[in-house]
């Protein structure tokens, strides 16, 4: 009989891609979310709409499954996570504590938690030419307010459930993930999707708004690599937090230039210093990732952004009535 797995957050960006990947691998998959996927139907064998802040719903979600890929979270790009500390921390702590306990009660064998590079301390990320972050750099702790603290605390909970109850827990720290079928408007979108949208809506030679001076740096990972890494970590015997990202550092200005090249448009950057910017620089040290998984993300930024840009450009294309959406900021 096929192994039965639960993917929480299956209506969201990474969760939806993960469901497709696991179904193709022959798993029986239950997806759970508070919403259905926005852009195409889920391939999950069973999809349930459940609010995982409620413990009784977590018990329903985890019943009869062998493994849990826990991706459900109240989250978004830097604008969203800096503007909603209390609600994000409240919602996600409820979801995470209830999901772990329900998984224990229902005898789940493996539990993977999707953590974030936002657990790393601000004091190691104050320079665009940042030293890549190693897993042990998370301490002494000074993570991102709200979202980073709840991720770091849930990492500890996973450790405690492994130590006290023998649960096989896995913790993955994603670095900025992008790709098609992700949020590109509405306030939760991250930089790659936001910039693809702005450039898709711009004419050749137009000006678009960039948050900050554009010299802040990040590394970006394409969603197919993310899903592959999640699966490899779940199958491994590694119980400690592990980075999952690329280690190619780019400035946001460079990111804009790459997307503009893909679009074939000349773009003028208007830097807006009052907008949320987060840390000044962030990169992944993949030394341990390579040691543990014998693998690291493979898809280049140019390749991944080409697919992502084309998808977002189709989403924002003029309607049949010739209307265009506004270039939102
Ligand atoms: P997403 O917002 O697209 O997906 C998260 C899903 O969780 C959403 O569909 C949302 O509806 C669902 N959810 C929220 N509250 C819920 C609730 N109460 N009950 C049930 N479902 C609920 O985000 P994503 O990019 O797919 O992220 C997936 C996971 O990866 C999250 O845990 C996120 O914190 C983590 N992560 C993502 C990134 C990234 O760059 N995308 C980076 C670091 C960490
Ligand atoms: N969102 C967004 N939209 N960011 C922009 C824009 C824009 O139009 N223009 C420039 N930026 C800049 C931001 O100011 C920030 O400095 C940088 O691009 C990256 O922004 P995000 O992609 O929104 O977030 P982040 O990298 O700071 O944090 C994200 O990644 C973490 C994991 O690495 C968030 O999604 C976190 O939730 C996530 O955990």
Image: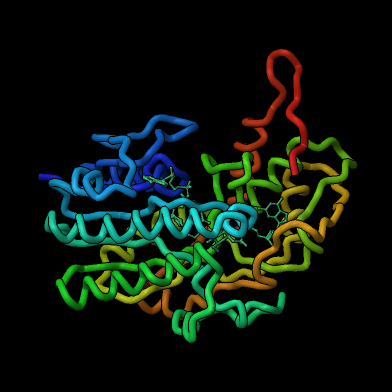
**Spot occupied by residue 121 in the image (x, y as percentages of width and height):** 55, 78
Residue at x-position 81% and y-position 61%: 273
The colour scheme used here is rainbow
Give the number of callouts.
Answer: 0
Q: Position of residue 275 (x, y in %)?
A: 75, 57
Describe residue 142's horizontal placement relative to residue 242 as left or right.
right
Is residue 165 placed above or below 206 in the rendered structure? below
Q: Residue at x 60, y 44 (%)?
A: 308
Return the residue found at the far bottom. Answer: 140
Q: Residue at x 13, y 57 (%)?
A: 105
The answer to whether residue 157 is visible is: yes
256 horizontally vs 41: left or right: right
Q: Is residue 234 left or right of residue 79?
A: left
- Residue 248 against residue 34 in the figure, above or below: below
Q: Depth check: 308 or 283 in front? A: 283
Q: Position of residue 179 (x, y in %)?
A: 55, 47
Q: In the rendered view, would you say 14 is above or below 284?
A: above
Name the residue located 85 percent from the left edge and 52 percent from the top edge. 269
Which of the 4 quarters of the picture holds residue 131? bottom right
| Residue furthest left as drawn | 1
Q: Looking at this view, is 296 or 230 the one in front?
A: 230
Return the residue nearer the eye: 233 or 30: 30
Q: Position of residue 201 (x, y in %)?
A: 76, 35
The quadrant in which the C terminus is found is: top right
Q: Quadrant of the N terminus?
A: top left
Q: Is residue 5 visible?
A: no
Q: Quadrant of residue 278?
A: bottom right
């Amino acid at each position: 009989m096929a192994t039965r797995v639960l993917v929480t957050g299956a209506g969201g960006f990474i969760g939806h891609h993960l469901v497709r990947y696991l179904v193709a691998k022959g798993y029986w998959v239950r997806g759970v979310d508070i919403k259905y996927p926005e852009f195409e139907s889920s391939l999950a064998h069973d999809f349930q709409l459940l609010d995982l802040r409620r413990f009784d719903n977590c018990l329903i979600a985890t019943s009869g499954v062998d493994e849990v890929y826990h991706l459900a979270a109240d989250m978004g790009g830097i604008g969203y996570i800096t503007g909603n500390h209390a609600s994000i921390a409240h919602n996600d702590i409820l979801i995470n504590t209830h999901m772990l306990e329900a998984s224990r009660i229902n005898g789940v064998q493996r539990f993977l938690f999707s953590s974030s590079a936002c657990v790393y301390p601000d004091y190691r990320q104050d320079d665009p030419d940042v030293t890549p972050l190693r897993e042990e750099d998370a301490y002494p702790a000074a993570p991102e307010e709200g979202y980073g603290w709840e991720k770091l605390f849930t990492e500890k909970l996973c450790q405690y459930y492994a130590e006290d109850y023998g649960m096989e827990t896995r913790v993955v720290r994603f670095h900025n993930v992008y790709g098609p079928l992700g949020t590109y408007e509405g306030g939760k979108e991250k930089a790659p999707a936001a910039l693809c949208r702005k450039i898709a809506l711009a004419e050749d030679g137009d000006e678009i708004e960039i948050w900050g001076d554009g010299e802040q740096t990040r590394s970006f990972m394409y969603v197919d690599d993310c899903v592959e890494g999640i699966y490899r970590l779940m199958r491994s015997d590694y119980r400690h937090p592990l980075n999952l990202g690329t280690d190619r550092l780019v400035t946001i200005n460079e990111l804009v230039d790459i997307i503009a090249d893909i679009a074939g448009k000349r773009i003028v950057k208007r830097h807006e210093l009052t907008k949320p910017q987060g840390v000044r620089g962030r990169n992944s040290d993949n030394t341990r990732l390579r040691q543990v998984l014998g693998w690291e993300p493979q898809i280049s930024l140019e390749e991944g952004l080409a697919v992502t840009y084309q998808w977002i450009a189709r989403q924002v294309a003029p309607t049949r009535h010739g209307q265009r959406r506004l270039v939102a900021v």
